[in-house]
Image (cartoon, helix red, strand yellow):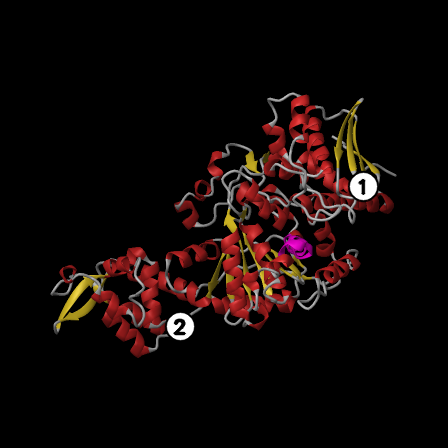
Amino acid sequence: MTAGSITEQARAEMVQADHVQIDMTRKTSAITLSDMEMFIFPELIYSLVLANIMSPRIWKWRETDWFAGLARMKPYRRITRLKQYVMDHYAFNLDLDTWGLTTRERELARFKNVIDVETLKQANALFGYEGDKYYFDIDIRRHFGLDKYEGNVIPYWKTETVEAMDSFRFKPGYGSGAGECVSLAALYASALFIVAGVPLREIYLMATPLHSQNFIDIEDGILTNNRRLVTRKMWFNGTALSAQARRALENEKVTIVAHETGYVHAVYEKATIDRNAYSEFSRKLGAFLKVSLTADIFGNFLRHSHEIQKCFQVRRPIHGIDHYIEAERVFAYEHGSPYLLTDNTRDRLLADIEQEEYKPGSIGGRIVLNDLEDYVTSRNIDLEEADDVALLESQFQPGCLHREKVMEALLRFCHFRPQLPDAGTRTFVREEEPLGIDVEMGREEIIERLSSIRDRNVMADMAFYAYRDLTRTEPGPFLIAAVHRNPVSIESTKGMDVAEIAGKITDLPDGSIYDGPGRLAQPDEVWNYGRGDGVEKAVLLANILRSRDPRGDMAIEVGPDRAVLRVGSREYRFSSGKGLAAASWPIDG
């Protein structure tokens, strides 16, 4: 072979080597499920959903009194019932230190064959993304607590399985389960399917650089937003809760849309999602985010737009004489009141305001909201017609308002277009077996189905790694993840000697947070939640000792009822109830 040349066989071997390395990285990523890993491997978002569906945890919800009679309820009622259960049992958690720290360089080295740093900066919060002007204005890195990580240090920002979410109740300061936004989105998608009976085809998961939520194709559509649900009516009601729900879609690009048929990603040309499903999703989400202008909607716009309220006044006749009050005062009175300025309870709201707050004459420089409402109602304004927009703009008298900015904000409020991955620049590839699971199937039937298509559907295959089932996956990826991506237990034991560490781990309460045989927690899950099976304790100790001696001879011998960690001539014995087949697991550095 001449210099600079390469045989086709050698080239094929290099490609295969890269494929094997990427496949192993994906498997280990399915176990740790960090923000970075799920961005690089978008199929893992749905693998987590499937892992939660395979878990017995959510299926047990159906046995509670709270969900009695659920089958007789209409879909929306079932979903709101589910929402209240999630609200009662889970808190939103964004403690970035929960799963420890890593560095940008370390993470980039793992994914150098997949993506480059400049691409990451455009769409990933941990690599410099700060969104558009809105996020610069509120200093988004400080808002999310990222500013405390200086230089190259970044949090792992891991996504939790339902078991890990449930186990937050074991941590000090938590009285219930908890999870960050991706965890809650995956939990909702799984529970919508298992408990509320929503087919997977009607559930779409959306990730932006700093948030994750779901779109449920039921009636006019429903968005999940952390623990809450947002209907189309709520989206346009102008309240603080709806403003919070609007923030991510209005100020960030959607980087990933995941569905039972696959995914589309903002930086990957290939899309595995069904083209028709993505087209239908885009159309229905667009319809969800669009509303006709009415007097009520304009009032909701004012409620949403605090700076614009000061340019309006509200008229109310008192004893036959017109009186006026600043719009912002009326909106302030809505807080704590069952009445609103924007519906048929207006008169009762205005009547609750003390008469001395009203002025007997019009307030100079302010538009009378009542008159503008009459104009909007009589004209049937179409915000997609330039002439109608111009006529409406002419009603805003100069002075307090910058007309163009008000119209821009109103159009954004009523006719928002999300920044979705462009279907026209994607190559849609359907190369995998459909998941083929539906709401009529039982848990064991679903597991059997997913197991049968693992070699033909990567989401199904990776689901078993996210599920942490070492009776159905090889131990290598689990152990690599364990000794390379669990820094909390290492950092927390820095001041202890080996005997103290071993004793502390041995004394932890027995019992895995993962139900059933063969399912194992990662070391930092055992450490954070203060409990574990013997195999998990052995892996936890191995993680800490391996960090102190990366090259030492180390292996774990597992069996149905035991785990023995051998470190050179020393051994540490633990009892186990995981029922694993006898094997020796080398712990490589």
Q: Position of residue 250 (x, y in %)?
A: 45, 57
What residue lies at 58% left-to-right and 60% top-to-bottom? Answer: 64
Asked if residue 395 can be seen in this view, the reply is: no
Query: Which element carries disc 2, helix, strand or loop?
Result: loop
Q: Nearer the viewer, mark 2 or mark 1?
A: 1
Residue identifier under label 1: 560
In the figure, 320 relative to 581: above or below? below
Q: Position of residue 81 (x, y in %)?
A: 52, 63
| Left or right: 209 as drawn, with respect to 439 | left
Q: Position of residue 105 (x, y in %)?
A: 61, 34
In the figure, 24 relative to 376: above or below? above
Foreground: 216 or 393?
216
Corner quadrant of residue 20? top right
| The magenta segment | 45-58
How many marks overall? 2
* Inter-mark Cα distance, 2 to 1: 64 Å
The amino acid sitting under disc 2 is Ser
Foreground: 114 or 172?
172
Nearer-N-terminus badge (2/1): 2
Residue identifier under label 2: 292
Which secondary structure class fits the magenta region best? helix
What residue lies at 59% left-to-right and 68% top-to-bottom? Answer: 279
- In magenta segment, residue 52: yes
